[in-house]
C-alpha cells in the first residue's frame, strides 16, 4: 500500500471509496471515536515524533488464538504534545518487538479501565504550577479520589516529563507513580524524571522496559498496516526545520506602549507544512553572538576552546550559539556551579529544602551573573558545558488560518526584554525576531494542538485571551469567516492600554461589521483608575456567558499560564454559580463537565 | 421693490427631503441632534463615534479627528486611527473672565494634551480630547458659564466683535450685542444638556427649535460686529457683518454687509471666496430684527441640495443681491437707509500697551498662530495662568489669534506688568511687521481636511521671508500674510496681501494683491507650487515694491496697480 501524498486535503479515488465503505458500517459512537483516532494519529504523525515519519504503521487489534505475552497499554497525559509524541514512539517500538500494544490519551481514559490492564506504561507531563496536563485533569482527580480502582495484578512504569526551572518538578509523574503503587499496582521499573532536554534518556528508559517485556519469542502475526487516509505527512520537524521566509515583521503595539508585540508573517511555500487553527509553530532558537561572547568572557573561556560531548569534540563558541541555554540558569546548573566554585552561598542555596528560595534567586541570577559572581579558575569547556541545559525550541500559537492566508503562517510574538544587574537582556527567539528583516528566514516546524480546535461551524464559541493569547482566535475567526460559518462568536480580550495594546483592533472591528464576530469585550488594566482584567469581565457578564454555555458554546482560554489561566478558571466557576444559582461545588462540576466534553480548551504558556 | 420676483426654489427648504442632499435627511432624522451619541459614548471596541454622530457632534461644538501624524503607522499596525476630539468654546466677541481662563487652562492641561488654540474667530479650541474626556471638559466649562453650543455645524457660529482697546465703552457695548445676538441666534439644543450634563429629557409642547426646525441652516452662518477704523474681524468675510456707525462717541446704527465667505474648492469654478456686500444702514435698536430677517432668508432659500453651494454668498449670487436685500427688508418690516460712509485703516492688531478713553490699560500680546503650550519655552501659557490668577479685568481674544489682557486698572498695572516681565510676556515683539500681521490656520496634525502644513510651517516660512524683507528694507513695512492648509481658508487668506493655501504636502497656491484691511480679494498668481518658487516670486515683488511704491502705498495696492496681481 503506497501512500500517495498530494497537496491539500484531496483524497484519491480509491481512498474515497474505502472511506465511504467504512463510514456506512459505523455507529455514531464508532465514527466519533475514529474521528478522534485519526485526528490524534494525524497530529502524532506530524508532531514531535522524529524527523522522517514516513509511514507509521497503525496496529489494528487482530483477534489472536493465544496471546503468549501480557498486553502492554501505553497511556499518556500531555498538554503541549511532548508526552503524546513519546507515547506514540513507545507504542511503535513495542509493536516492532511483536508486543500487543494499545495507546490511549488519559484525556479520554477512565481510571476504572486500569484494573483490566496487564502491563501499563504511563508518560505524564506537568503543567501550570505542578498540576496534571489540563485535558487529563479528570483522570488524575478520580485516580486520587475514593472511586480509584484496586490494581492487584497490574504492573506499571511511569515516565515523568517536567521542566527543572519550575518549583514542582515532574510533580504529576511523581504523584502518579506513588498512587499506582498505593492502589496495589506492581512497579515494573523505577520512575524516570525527564527535564525538557532529557527526552533522549526517556526514550532509552522505555526501550529497555520494552526489551524486558518482549523477552518471550514473538508469536503474534505481523500487524496489518493501514495506510493513513489523507493524513498529511509533515516533512519537517525539530531536527530539520523548514527555513521560512519572513514576509512581514512589524510591531503592532502602538507608539507609547509599555511593551512590544510583533506581527510576523512567514511563507511556507515548498515546505509541505500544513496547520489547523489552534496549532503552534515551533522556532529553533540560536543565541546571539553578543550573548555568547558575554558568557565566554564571564567564564574566562575562548570560543575556540574544545568541549567533549557524548558525540565527540566541538568548538565551545559554536556549541553555545546553537546548543545550549545560556540565559536562564537551572537548579542543575546551580548545583553544578556550587561544586565547581565551592562558593558557600551557592552550596547553601543548593540544599534540597531551599527549592522555592532557589527558584526565586535563579529568577534574578542568570548564567552570566552566576559566572561573574562566583568565578571558577582553571575552568575547562567540557566541565562548563556539563551544567547547561540544551536549547529548546520556542512555540507560538499560530495567528492565522492557512487557507485564508494563502498558505502563509502568522504569529503574534511578545518581545521579551528586561533589565538584570544593570544590563538590557532579551529573549533568545523574540529578541532575535525583533531585529530580523523581511526576506530573512526562520527555522520552523509545525506542532499540532489537538486540544485547541474550532467546534463545528454552527456551534457558538467564547474566546478568552490576554495579550498574545489573542493569537489563535485570529485564525479561528478567519477560518469561520472564510467558511461563512453561522455559529456566533464572542471575543473577550484583555491587555494593558486601549490606545496602544488592542492587538489587531481594526480586524476585529471589520469582522464584527461583516458578522463573522458577534460580540467583543475589550478590557484594559492600565487605562482606568482601577485595574480590570478578562476574569473581571467574565464575572460582570456572568448571565450572558452562562446563556452561551447553555446553548452549547465552546470556551477557549489562551495566554499566560501562571496568572491569567487559573484566575479565569476561578472566575468561570463563580460566573456559572452566580448565573445558574448552583453552589460552588455544583458549578465546579459544570465546568469540569465542559472540560471533559472538550468544550473548555486551553492554550496557555 | 414690493413684488417678489418669481425665484427658483428647487433646492431649498420648500422641497421634500428626498430632493435635497443627504445631510438634510440626517439632520431631520437626528431627533434634534441627539442621534445615537449616547450609545456611541459607551462603545468599548472603538474610541470614535459613527460618521453620522460625528456630523451631529459638530453642532455641539465638537469635531471628531485623529492624529494624522500616526494615521499611516497605525493602519499598518492594524490599530484604529488615534481618534481624538477638538472642542471649540462658544465665546461671543472673544471676551472671557480670569476665572474662565483658569478653568479653560486647567481643562486643557488635564484632558487637552497640555495645549490650547486661540482661533481666527476669537475663541478657544481644545485638541487631543479623548471621547471619555468630553463630558468632564464640557461640564467643567458649564461650571464657569461656558459651553460649546453651535461653535460648529449648520447654525449661527461664534459671533465676532472688534477688540479695539482704545474705544473701551464702545467695545463694551458691541461685546454685549455680540453676546446677546449669539444667545438668540444659536439653537436651543436640548440634546446638548441631555448628553453632556445628564439632564433628563423633558416632554416638549410644540417644536423644540421654533426658528431652526429639524434641518437647521443650510450651512454655517457667521456674524460679526466691527468698529471702524479697525476691520480686525474682516467684516467682508462674514455672512452677516455689522459695521458700527459712531457719532460723537455713540453707536447710532450699523451698515449691514451680507454674503462674505472664504471657502472654495480647487478647480471647482462654482466655488469662490466672496466679499460681503453692504446693502444699507439700520438704526442700532433694529439689529435683532435684521439678524432674524437675514438668517431666515438664508434658512429658507439657501441651497440644500448641493452643500458646495449652500453658503449665503451663493444664495445671494443665485437669487441676485437686489432680490435678497428686498426680501430681508420685507421680513424685517422696514427699509434700509442708505449706507453711511466708513473708512478702515487695517485689519491687524496693535501690539503692546494701550490705554482706553476710560483710563484703563490693555496689553496686546502676540501669540504666533494662537498656539499655547503648557511648559513650553515661550512661557506664554504658564505666564498667562499666573496673570489670570491675579487679574481683575478681562481677556479679549483677537481675530488675529492674539490676546489682549484688558481693563487693567491703573492700580493693578504695576503688578500685572511685573508678573508679565517675570514670565517674559512683555518682551516687546521682535520680528518684522509682516510677522506681526501673519496668521495661519491649524491644519496638521489635527485638521482632517488639511492638504499641506500651515501652523507648523509658518515659523519656517517667516524665517525665510524675513531676510528677503531686510534685503529690500521692508522689515518695518506691515504686509498681511495668511497661510491656510487647504482652500477652505480658515485664516481668511483670500483677502490678505500675500496668501498661501495648501494643495499638497509642501505645495501651495500663491495669491497676491488682497486689501490691507481685507477690502479686496487677492489673485491666484502661482498654482500648486513649492517654497522655492514662492520665495523667488515674492523676492522679485518685494524688490519692485521697495523701488517703485509711492509713499505709504500698501503692498497689495501696489501689486494691483502694477499688474503684478494678474491671474496665473
Ligand atoms: C480653528 C480655525 C482656524 C484657526 O487657525 O483659527 C478653523 C479650523 C477649522 N475649520 Fe474653519 N476654522 C476657523 C475659521 C474659519 C474661517 C474664518 C472666519 O470664520 O472668519 C473660515 C472662512 C470664512 C468662511 O466660513 O467662509 C473657515 C472656513 C472653513 C470651511 C469652509 C467653509 C465653506 O463655506 O466652504 C471649513 C470646511 C467646512 O465647513 O466644510 C472649515 C472647517 C474647519 C475645521 C473644523 C476642519 C473640519 O471641518 O474638520 C478646522 C479644525 C482644525 C483643527 O484641527 O482645529 N472652516 N474657518 C478657525 C476657528 C474659528 C472659530 O472659532 O469658529
Ligand atoms: C504552546 C505555546 C504557545 C505559545 N504562544 C505564544 C505566542 O503566541 N506569543 C508569544 O509571544 N509567546 C508564546 N509562547 C511563549 C514562547 O514560546 C516563548 O516562551 C517566549 O516567546 C519567550 O521566548 P524567548 O526565546 O524570546 O525568550 P527566552 O530566551 O526563553 O527568555 C525567557 C526567559 O527570560 C527570563 N526572563 C524574562 N523576563 C524576565 C524578567 N523580567 N526578569 C528576569 N528574567 C526574565 C525568564 O527566565 C524567562 O523564562 C508560547 C509558548 C507555548 C508553550
Ligand atoms: C505553562 C507551563 C507550565 C509548566 N509547569 C511545569 C511545572 O510546574 N513543573 C514541571 O516540572 N514542568 C512544568 N512544565 C514543563 C512541561 O512539563 C514540559 O515542557 C513537558 O515536556 C511538556 O510535555 P507535554 O508537551 O507533553 O505537555 C510547564 C510547561 C508549561 C508550558
Ligand atoms: S484651512 Fe483647511 S487645513 Fe486649515 S484649518 Fe481650515 S480646514 Fe483645516
Image (cartoon, coloured by chain):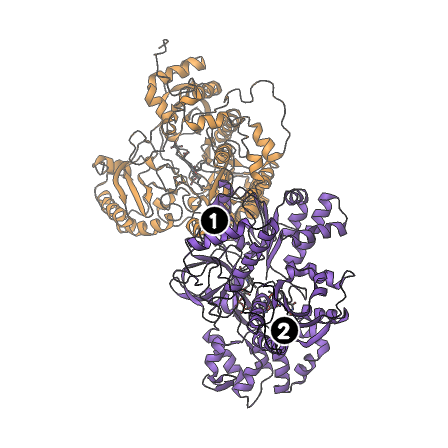
Chain colours: A purple, B orange
Residue A412 percent coordinates (x, y): 50, 58
Whether residue A265 is visible, yes or no, is yes
- Chain of the residue under the numbered disc 2 shown in the image: A
Which quarter of the figure has residue B391? top right
Residue A374 shown left or right of residue B20 in the figure: right
- The residue that label 1 is drawn on is B426
Residue A318 percent coordinates (x, y): 46, 79
Disc 1 secondary structure class: loop
Point out the quarter of the image occupied by ligand 1.
top left
Spot the residue most to the top. Answer: B3
Spot the residue most to the front. Answer: A65
Q: Are the residues at dot 1 and dot 2 in contact (C-beta closer than 8 Å)?
A: no
**Label 2 neighbourhood size at 10 Å, few (<14), some (14-19), many (20+)?**
many
Please determine whether, in this image, residue A240 is positioned above or below residue A267.
below
The label shown at residue B367 is: none
Spot the residue most to the bottom. Answer: A378
* Mark 1: C-beta under 8 Å from nearest atom of ligand 1: no
Is residue A292 or residue A28 the one in the foreground? A28
Is residue A506 or residue B352 the one in the foreground? A506
* Mark 2: C-beta under 8 Å from nearest atom of ligand 3: yes
Q: Quadrant of the C terminus of chain A?
A: bottom right
- Chain of the residue under the numbered disc 1 shown in the image: B
Q: CA distance from mark 1 to mark 2?
A: 71 Å
**Label 1 neighbourhood size at 10 Å, few (<14), some (14-19), many (20+)?**
some
The label shown at residue A164 is: 2
Please determine whether, in this image, residue A18 is positioned above or below residue B64.
below
Is residue A351 or residue B497 the one in the foreground? A351
Image point 48% across, 47% down: which residue?
A506
Nearer mark to the viewer, of 1 and 2: 2
Residue B452 percent coordinates (x, y): 35, 45
Disc 2 secondary structure class: loop
Please determine whether, in this image, residue B27 is positioned above or below residue A262.
above
Amino acid at each position: 500500500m503506497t501512500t500517495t501524498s498530494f497537496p491539500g486535503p484531496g483524497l484519491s479515488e480509491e481512498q474515497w471509496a474505502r472511506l465511504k465503505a467504512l463510514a456506512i458500517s459505523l455507529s455514531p459512537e464508532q465514527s466519533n471515536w475514529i474521528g478522534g483516532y485519526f485526528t490524534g494519529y494525524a497530529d502524532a504523525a506530524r508532531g514531535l515524533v522524529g524527523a522522517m515519519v514516513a509511514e507509521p504503521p497503525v496496529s489494528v487489534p487482530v483477534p489472536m488464538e493465544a496471546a503468549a505475552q501480557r498486553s502492554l497499554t501505553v497511556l499518556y497525559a500531555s498538554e503541549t504534545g511532548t508526552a503524546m509524541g513519546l507515547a506514540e514512539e513507545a507504542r511503535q517500538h513495542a509493536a516492532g518487538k511483536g508486543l500487543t500494544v494499545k495507546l490511549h490519551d488519559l484525556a479520554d481514559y477512565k481510571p476504572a479501565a486500569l484494573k483490566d490492564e496487564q502491563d501499563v506504561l504511563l508518560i505524564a507531563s506537568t503543567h501550570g504550577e505542578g498540576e496534571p496536563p489540563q485535558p487529563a485533569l479528570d483522570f488524575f482527580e478520580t485516580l486520587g479520589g475514593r472511586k480509584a480502582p484496586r490494581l492487584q495484578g497490574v504492573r506499571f512504569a511511569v515516565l515523568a516529563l517536567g521542566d527543572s526551572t519550575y518549583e514542582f518538578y515532574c510533580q504529576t509523574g511523581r504523584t502518579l507513580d506513588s498512587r499506582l503503587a498505593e492502589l496495589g499496582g506492581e512497579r515494573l521499573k523505577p520512575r524516570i524524571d525527564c527535564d525538557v532536554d532529557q527526552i533522549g534518556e526517556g526514550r532509552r528508559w522505555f526501550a529497555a522496559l520494552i526489551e524486558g517485556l518482549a523477552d518471550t519469542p514473538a508469536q503474534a502475526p505481523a500487524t496489518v498496516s493501514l495506510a493513513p487516509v489523507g493524513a498529511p505527512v509533515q516533512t519537517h520537524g525539530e531536527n530539520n526545520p523548514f527555513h521560512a521566509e519572513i514576509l512581514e515583521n512589524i510591531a503592532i503595539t502602538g507608539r507609547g506602549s509599555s511593551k512590544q508585540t510583533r506581527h510576523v508573517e512567514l511563507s511556507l511555500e515548498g515546505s509541505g507544512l500544513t496547520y489547523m487553527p489552534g496549532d503552534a509553530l515551533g522556532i529553533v532558537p540560536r543565541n546571539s553572538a553578543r550573548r555568547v561572547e558575554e558568557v565566554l568572557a564571564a567564564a574566562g573561556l575562548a570560543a575556540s576552546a574544545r568541549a567533549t560531548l557524548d558525540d565527540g569534540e566541538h568548538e565551545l563558541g559554536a556549541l553555545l550559539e546553537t546548543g545550549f541555554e545560556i540565559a536562564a540558569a537551572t537548579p542543575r546548573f546551580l548545583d553544578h556551579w556550587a561544586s565547581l566554585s565551592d562558593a558557600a552561598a551557592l552550596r547553601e542555596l543548593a540544599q534540597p529544602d531551599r527549592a522555592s528560595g532557589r527558584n526565586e534567586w535563579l529568577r534574578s541570577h542568570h548564567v552570566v551573573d552566576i559566572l561573574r559572581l562566583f568565578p571558577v579558575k582553571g575552568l575547562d569547556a567540557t566541565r562548563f558545558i556539563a551544567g547547561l541545559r540544551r536549547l529548546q525550541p520556542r512555540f507560538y500559537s499560530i495567528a492565522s488560518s492557512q487557507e485564508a492566508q494563502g498558505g502563509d503562517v502568522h504569529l503574534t510574538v511578545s518581545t521579551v526584554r528586561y533589565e538584570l544587574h544593570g544590563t538590557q537582556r532579551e529573549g533568545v527567539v523574540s529578541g532575535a525576531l525583533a531585529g530580523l528583516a523581511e526576506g530573512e528566514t526562520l527555522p520552523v516546524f509545525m506542532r499540532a494542538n489537538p486540544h485547541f480546535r474550532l467546534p463545528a461551524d454552527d456551534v457558538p464559541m467564547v474566546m478568552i485571551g490576554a495579550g498574545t493569547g489573542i493569537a489563535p482566535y485570529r485564525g479561528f475567526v478567519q477560518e469561520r469567516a472564510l467558511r461563512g460559518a453561522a455559529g456566533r462568536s464572542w471575543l473577550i480580550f484583555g491587555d494593558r492600554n486601549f490606545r496602544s495594546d488592542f492587538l489587531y483592533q481594526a480586524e476585529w472591528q471589520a469582522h464584527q461589521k461583516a458578522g463573522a464576530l458577534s460580540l467583543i469585550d475589550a478590557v484594559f488594566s492600565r487605562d482606568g483608575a482601577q485595574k480590570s482584567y478578562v476574569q473581571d469581565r467574565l464575572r460582570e457578564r456572568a448571565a450572558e456567558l452562562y446563556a452561551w454555555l447553555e446553548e452549547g458554546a465552546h470556551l477557549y482560554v489562551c495566554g499566560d499560564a501562571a496568572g491569567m489561566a487559573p484566575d479565569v478558571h476561578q472566575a468561570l466557576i463563580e460566573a456559572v454559580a452566580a448565573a445558574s444559582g448552583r453552589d460552588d461545588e455544583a458549578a465546579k462540576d459544570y465546568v469540569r463537565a465542559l472540560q471533559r466534553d472538550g468544550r473548555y480548551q486551553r492554550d496557555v504558556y | 421693490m414690493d413684488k417678489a420676483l418669481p425665484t427658483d426654489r428647487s433646492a431649498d427648504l420648500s422641497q421634500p427631503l428626498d430632493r435635497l442632499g443627504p445631510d438634510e435627511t440626517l439632520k431631520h432624522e437626528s431627533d434634534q441632534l441627539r442621534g445615537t451619541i449616547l450609545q456611541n459614548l459607551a462603545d468599548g471596541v472603538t474610541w470614535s463615534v459613527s460618521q453620522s454622530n460625528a456630523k451631529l457632534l459638530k453642532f455641539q461644538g465638537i469635531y471628531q479627528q485623529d492624529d494624522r501624524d500616526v494615521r499611516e503607522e497605525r493602519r499598518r499596525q492594524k490599530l484604529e486611527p488615534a481618534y481624538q476630539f477638538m472642542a471649540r468654546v462658544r465665546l461671543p466677541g472673544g471676551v472671557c473672565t480670569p476665572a474662565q481662563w483658569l478653568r479653560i487652562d486647567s481643562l486643557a492641561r488635564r484632558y487637552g494634551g497640555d495645549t490650547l488654540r486661540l482661533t481666527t474667530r476669537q475663541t478657544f479650541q481644545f485638541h487631543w480630547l479623548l471621547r471619555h474626556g468630553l463630558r468632564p471638559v464640557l461640564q467643567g466649562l458649564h461650571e464657569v458659564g461656558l459651553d460649546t453650543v453651535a461653535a460648529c455645524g449648520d447654525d449661527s457660529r461664534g459671533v465676532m466683535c472688534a477688540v479695539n482697546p482704545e474705544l473701551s465703552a464702545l467695545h463694551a457695548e458691541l461685546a454685549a450685542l455680540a453676546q446677546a445676538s449669539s444667545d438668540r441666534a444659536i439653537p436651543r439644543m436640548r440634546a446638548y444638556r441631555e448628553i453632556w450634563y445628564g439632564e433628563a429629557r423633558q416632554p416638549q409642547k410644540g417644536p423644540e427649535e421654533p426658528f431652526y426646525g429639524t434641518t437647521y441652516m443650510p450651512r454655517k452662518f457667521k456674524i460679526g460686529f466691527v468698529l471702524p477704523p479697525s476691520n480686525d474681524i474682516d467684516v467682508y468675510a462674514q455672512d452677516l457683518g455689522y459695521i458700527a456707525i459712531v457719532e460723537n462717541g455713540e453707536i447710532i446704527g450699523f451698515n449691514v454687509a451680507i454674503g462674505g465667505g472664504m471657502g472654495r474648492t480647487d478647480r471647482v469654478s462654482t466655488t469662490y471666496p466672496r466679499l460681503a456686500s453692504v446693502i444699507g444702514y439700520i438704526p442700532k435698536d433694529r439689529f435683532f430684527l435684521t439678524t432674524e430677517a437675514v438668517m431666515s432668508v438664508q434658512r429658507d432659500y439657501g441651497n440644500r441640495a448641493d452643500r458646495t453651494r449652500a453658503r449665503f454668498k451663493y444664495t445671494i449670487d443665485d437669487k441676485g443681491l437686489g432680490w435678497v436685500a428686498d426680501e430681508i427688508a420685507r421680513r424685517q418690516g422696514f427699509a434700509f437707509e442708505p449706507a453711511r460712509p466708513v473708512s478702515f485703516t487695517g485689519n491687524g492688531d496693535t501690539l503692546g500697551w494701550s490705554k482706553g478713553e476710560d483710563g484703563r490699560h490693555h496689553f496686546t500680546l502676540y501669540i504666533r498662530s494662537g498656539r499655547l503650550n503648557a511648559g513650553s519655552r515661550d512661557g506664554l501659557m504658564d505666564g498667562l495662568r499666573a496673570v489670570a490668577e491675579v487679574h481683575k479685568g478681562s481677556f479679549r481674544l483677537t481675530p488675529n489669534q492674539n490676546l489682549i489682557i484688558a481693563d487693567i486698572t491703573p492700580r493693578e498695572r504695576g503688578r500685572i506688568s511685573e508678573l508679565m516681565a517675570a514670565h517674559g510676556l512683555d518682551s516687546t515683539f521682535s520680528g518684522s511687521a509682516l510677522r506681526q500681521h501673519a496668521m495661519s490656520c491649524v491644519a496638521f496634525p489635527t485638521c482632517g481636511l488639511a492638504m499641506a502644513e500651515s501652523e507648523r510651517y509658518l515659523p519656517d516660512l517667516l524665517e525665510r521671508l524675513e531676510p528677503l524683507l531686510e534685503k529690500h528694507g521692508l522689515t518695518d513695512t506691515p504686509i498681511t500674510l495668511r497661510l491656510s492648509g487647504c482652500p477652505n481658508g480658515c485664516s481668511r487668506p483670500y483677502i490678505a496681501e500675500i496668501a498661501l493655501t495648501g494643495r499638497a504636502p509642501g505645495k501651495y497656491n500663491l495669491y497676491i494683491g488682497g486689501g490691507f484691511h481685507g477690502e479686496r480679494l487677492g489673485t491666484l498668481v502661482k498654482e500648486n507650487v513649492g517654497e522655492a518658487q514662492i520665495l523667488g516670486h515674492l523676492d522679485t515683488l518685494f524688490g519692485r515694491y521697495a523701488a517703485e511704491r509711492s509713499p505709504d502705498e500698501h503692498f497689495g495696492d501696489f501689486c494691483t496697480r502694477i499688474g503684478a496681481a494678474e491671474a496665473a
